[in-house]
Amino acid sequence: EIVLTQSPGTLSLSPGERATLSCRASQNISSSYYLAWYQQKAGQAPSLLIYGASSRATGIPDRFSGSGSGTDFTLTISRLEPEDFAVYYCQQYGRSRWTFGQGTKVEIK
Amino acid sequence: EVQLLESGGGLVQPGGSLRLSCAASGFAFTNSAMSWVRQAPGKGLEWVSSISLVSDSTYYADSVKGRFTISRDNSKNTLYLRMDRLTADDTAIYYCAKGGGVKPHFDNWGRGTRVTVS
């Protein structure tokens, strides 16, 4: 089973700043299509942000971008808006299993 | 608009059973693989199970294999999760999610139903 490790655990930033979130896989992810990112706001269900490592889901603003391949993936929020403070999870698919990282909390500094 | 509405959660004793349901609308249910994802209190997301379009393939996390059964009724646009031999570790919010097949991501989620084993 592929284990996803996200870093940092918590990111303390101010609105307008850039956020860079990392997701590292324990093994090579066979296709970038199998890597996704989700946002979860407090008390809400998760929602899809990025799929295929770099494709934005419907309605996601372009300040969110994803990149990476193999074992190293990154979610970047170019300029944090107040509504972006939340927990972010990466997720991968492989060999009929889906796994999530443990999450990165982006909090207001 | 895609809507996924879970129901069936509640308080159950260890060793007991529950059946969760997820009523889907706003999309072609028969064209979508479906999944369950759970979140224990204060914890992260854990994939539980997925089912293919016509139920010919089902997949389970090791933590629930042999105890949980995923199924779907395409005539009713409804997804199910039968949970047996529940333990305290199964306490979580259970989310129904669209995806988990050809699309290996989950592009729509329900609001969840809470299961407490105590």
Image (cartoon, coloured by chain):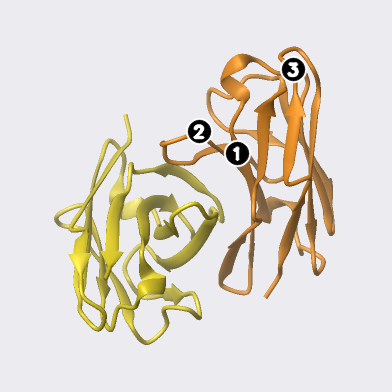
Chain colours: A orange, B yellow
* Lower position in the chain sequence, tag 3 or tag 2: 3
CA–CA distance between discs 1 and 2? 6 Å
* Lower position in the chain sequence, tag 1 or tag 2: 2
Residues at circles 1 and 2 in contact by the CB criterion of under 8 Å: yes
* Lower position in the chain sequence, tag 3 or tag 1: 3
Q: Is residue B63 visible to the viewer in this orientation of the structure? A: yes
Residue on which disc 1 sits? A87
Amino acid type assigned to the residue bearing label 3 in the image: Ser
Mark 3 vs mark 1: tell me if same chain: yes
Residue on which disc 3 sits? A14
Q: For numbered disc 1, what is the local secondary structure?
A: strand
CA–CA distance between discs 3 and 1? 15 Å
Residue at the image point whose x is 29% and y is 54% from the top? B114
- Name the quarter where the N terminus of chain A is drawn: bottom right
Foreground mark, 3 or 1, reads 3
Q: Is residue A69 above or below residue B90?
A: above
Residue on which disc 2 sits? A41
Instruction: Classify 10 Å Cα crowding around label 2: few (below 14), some (14-19), many (20 and above).
Output: some
CA–CA distance between discs 3 and 2? 17 Å
- Name the quarter where the C terminus of chain A is drawn: top right
Most extreme residue toward the top, as rendered? A16
As drawn, is A96 to the left or to the right of B94? right
As drawn, is A20 to the left or to the right of A10? right
Foreground mark, 3 or 2, reads 3
Label 2 marks a residue whose chain is A
Total number of numbered discs in the rendering: 3
